[in-house]
Image (spheres, rainbow, N blue to C red):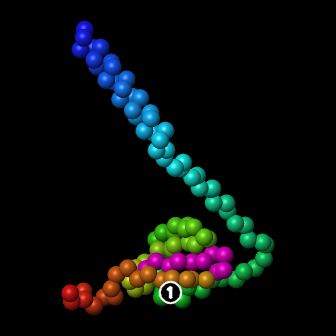
């Protein structure tokens, strides 16, 4: 009986201590990111975007990034690569080659 009373008192003190600590040290509120709204291009003929990739190249994946960028994974026609496409300005801003061309060995340490 006495043990139960001691446990209740200790539990109450721990609970009060946690509440006081949380009030004294609040966490910053999580900032909700607004959902990206699709950008509609005005009607018109914009032509084609020429990537200049070799024959046999195909798209293996695409991921939309912040700031209107589209990461496009390409395979075939050479080493695998990723292009960063600035959709709004219709230009390729970066090209990342993922593996060495055939016949090249790993660099010496």
The part of the image, by quadrant, that contains residue 104 is bottom left
Q: Residue 93 at what x, y percent from top left?
A: 55, 83
Front residue of 28/84: it is 28
Q: Residue furthest left?
A: 109
- Residue where numbered disc 1 is placed: 53
Does residue 82 show up magenta in the picture?
yes
Question: In which quadrant will I find the N terminus?
Answer: top left
Asked if residue 71 lies left or right of residue 86, the reply is: left
Q: Is residue 58 visible?
A: no
Q: Quadrant of residue 68?
A: bottom right
Circle 1 — which element?
A: loop
Q: Which residues are magenta?
A: 81-90
| 97 w.r.t. 17: above or below | below
Identify the residue at horizontal 63%, vertical 56% (top origin): 34
Horizontally, residue 49 falls left or right of residue 105, namely: right
Give the camera-side residue of 70 and 21.
21
User: Residue 69, relative to residue 108: is it above or below?
Assistant: above
Q: Is residue 42 left or right of residue 62?
A: right
Residue 9 sits in quarter: top left
Q: In the image as oriented, which residue stretches furthest toward the top?
A: 1
Q: Residues within 10 Å of mark 1 (few under 14, many from 20)?
A: few
Q: Main secondary structure of the magenta part?
A: strand
Percent position of residue 24, x then y: 47, 41
Q: Which residue is drawn at the image coordinates 63% and 75% (left, top)? A: 87
Depth check, front residue: 1 or 70: 1
Q: Is residue 94 above or below residue 22?
A: below
Q: Residue furthest right?
A: 43
**Residue under the point 53% across and 77% down:** 84
Q: Position of residue 38 (x, y in %)?
A: 67, 62
Return the x and y of residue 100 as percentages of the image width and height. Answer: 33, 85
Q: Residue at x 66, y 80 (%)?
A: 89
Q: Is residue 80 magenta?
A: no
């Amino acid at each position: 009986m006495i043990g139960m009373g001691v446990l209740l008192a200790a539990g109450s003190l721990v609970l009060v201590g946690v509440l006081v600590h949380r009030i004294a040290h609040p966490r910053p509120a999580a900032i909700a990111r607004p959902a990206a709204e699709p950008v509609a291009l005005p009607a018109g003929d914009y032509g084609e975007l020429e990537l200049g990739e070799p024959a046999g190249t195909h798209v293996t994946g695409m991921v939309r990034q912040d700031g209107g960028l589209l990461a496009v994974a390409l395979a075939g026609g050479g080493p695998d690569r990723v292009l960063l496409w600035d959709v709004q300005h219709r230009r390729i801003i970066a090209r990342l080659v993922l593996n060495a061309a055939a016949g090249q060995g790993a660099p010496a340490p």
